[in-house]
Image: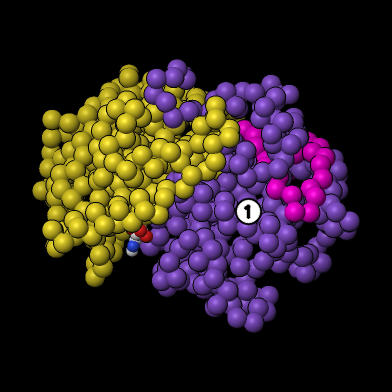
Chain colours: A yellow, B purple
Amino acid sequence: MSFLRIENLSVAIRGGGPLLRRVSLEVAAGEVMALVGESGAGKSMIGKAVLGILPRAAQITEGRIWLDGEDLLALSATARRQRIGAKAALIPQDPLTALNPVRRIAPQITDRLVDILGWDRAKAEARARDLLGEVQIADPDRVMRSYPHELSGGMRQRILIASAFAAEPRLIVADEPTTALDVTVQKQILRLIRDMQARHGTALLFVTHDLGVVSKICQRLTVLYGGLVLEQTDVRAFFKAPGHPYSAALLAATPRHDDPEASLNPVPEAVIAAAQAEVAAFDRSAPHG
Amino acid sequence: MDDIYDVQGLRLSLADMARKPLFGPAPRLEILKGPTFRIRRGEVVGIVGGSGSGKSTLGRALVRLLEPSAGTIRFEGADITHLDDAALRPLRRRMQMIFQDPMSSLNPRHRVGQIIAAPLVLHGDDDPRRRALEALDQVGLPRGFATRYPHELSGGQRQRVGIARAIALRPDFILADEIVSGLDVSSQAQVLAVLRALVRDLGLTLAFISHDLSVIRRLCDRVIVLHQGVIVEDGPCAQVFAAPSAAYTRELLDAIPDPDPDQPWF
Ligand SMILES: Nc1ncnc2c1ncn2[C@@H]1O[C@H](COP(=O)(O)OP(=O)(O)OP(=O)(O)O)[C@@H](O)[C@H]1O
Ligand SMILES: Nc1ncnc2c1ncn2[C@@H]1O[C@H](COP(=O)(O)OP(=O)(O)OP(=O)(O)O)[C@@H](O)[C@H]1O
Ligand SMILES: [Mg+2]
Ligand SMILES: [Mg+2]
């Protein structure tokens, strides 16, 4: 069985409409699954549901989530938190709010190692320093002693990447992990992610809007619109021939470095209207979904 | 007078508190090491460079959220390098910064409508509510979002609230710090179209910090490349992209991943 398996997951806002509509996806050990789709499609919601950190107003109304063969939603809340903490980690979308503004960086990386893996602090700090080096932080000693506001946006994002990798989790949900990085650092980070994955067989759920990045490090991809999966396929097949008009439009809107004349093509309104119609048709066929 | 900004030999250092000895002053960390450039009215200037190279610091200095240690910044001919808060107040409406971290700059306890209207109220706009709703339209968010709280929005939706707040004031100059990096291609296209329309219709001047070179190439007339606090290249976009003169610029261009799984990249 895949390391992560989500089956028919629906999430709704209490007293509001659904945000996820029977989403199913699997990520095997050592595999990178891309999750793409426009702003508000529900990409972060999927990650939050897996990690048990949905906003209080949101609620799972249907479906199952298996992590390493265990049915997470069948566990007690305490057991669930413990399993998730030991096996999975998140690289969150918003790098500043994810770090505690009044604590220095060092303990924010090492706490997990000390609390979850039972390492002693000195060993955890040495590991944290090495990891900061690996994510191309030029001055790890200064950064370990800094507060978040003393660091640039890209530095904070790399700290969160380092801290997600620190405890060698078997699943990482990476929510737009390189949005604050310049392309050279992004490339080094993606190489690092790929190497760590090869070494530890980490399963990766990779949320991104950058199809260039998808083509370089993901094996499979899920296209989401309005909380509904429109397409799920192999990356090579996708770039050869996207299987849904909406995915084809996303691909056409992606800039190419070797084609500077290509103008920015937003997804055509007719394509969006068709995707919306699909969501509406789904709701008619599954009224309580 | 056609320069909106004239920046000469800008230096900025900050106290390195992480290395502060128990007694005595903290050592200084040199962040900006002498950038010199002008920005013409109505121009769209891209600022690119490595993570930690000083782009956000430069942006904060331009809108005078930070005070330079040396050098001068002229805004429409007036030296604003060391103006105090009171003297800066009348300028604040005219220079806006849209921040890199949307969540940290939006008050979590206020609804979106209030967040966008607050600066309008502060500056005595006649109809802040209407302006706020128009600004939501302009960034492609439904008007119904005015009653939501920031935590009820997705990352990209929050980013657009930050943009709506800045453009609602109709400033003369906007410094946008990585504002489209987290957006999908269609939201990106929408935001870029809004910015372009503002530049064209209102004569807005825009400095646009981004690590996304394809966005810079589409949006900007000119691009400044910053590397470790120093400008290594400054020229028209078309020229810099076609024939970069600095090794660092070339390195950046080579690291862009094209959407093609068969093309070797790593
Ligand atoms: N607490 C909440 N209450 C109501 N609606 C919410 C709440 N949190 C999120 N939403 C809505 O749920 C939808 C999905 O949000 P999600 O954060 O998963 O989007 P996303 O695909 O990650 O988008 P982005 O690319 O912009 O980050 C959005 O339309 C958002 O407005
Ligand atoms: N308040 C501060 N105290 C100490 N150092 C700071 C402070 N603010 C920024 N720095 C340092 O200044 C340098 C430049 O930061 P800046 O935020 O300008 O970079 P940037 O080019 O915007 O990078 P990014 O692309 O990652 O956002 C970094 O090394 C950062 O750690
Ligand atoms: Mg998101
Ligand atoms: Mg920055």
Q: Is mark 1 within 8 Å of ligand 1?
A: no
Q: What amino acid is found at the position of numbered circle 1 in the picture?
A: Arg
- Residue at the disc numbered 1: B196
Q: Nearer the viewer, residue A263 or B183?
A: A263
* Residue at the image point whose x is 19% and y is 43% from the top: A24
Count of labels in the image:
1
Q: Secondary structure at mark 1?
A: helix
* Residue at the image point whose x is 42% and y is 48% from the top: A267
Circle 1 marks a residue in which chain?
B
On the image, the x and y values in percent for residue A70 come to 13, 38
Residue B33 falls within the magenta-colored stretch = yes
Residue B180 falls within the magenta-colored stretch = no
Residue that extends furthest to the bottom in the rendered view of this protein: B126
Residue B20, visible in the rendered structure: no
Residue A2, quarter of picture:
top left
Q: Nearer the viewer, residue B97 or B88?
A: B97
The boundaries of the magenta stretch are B24-50
On the image, the x and y values in percent for residue B180 come to 53, 48
On the image, the x and y values in percent for residue A230 come to 26, 45
Indicate the quadrant containing the N terminus of chain B: top left, top right, bottom left or bottom right: bottom right
Residue A220, visible in the rendered structure: yes
Q: Nearer the viewer, residue A127 or A21?
A: A21
Residue A216 lies, with reference to residue A271, above or below; the image says above
How many other residues sit within 10 Å of disc 1, few (<14), some (14-19) or many (≥20)? Answer: some
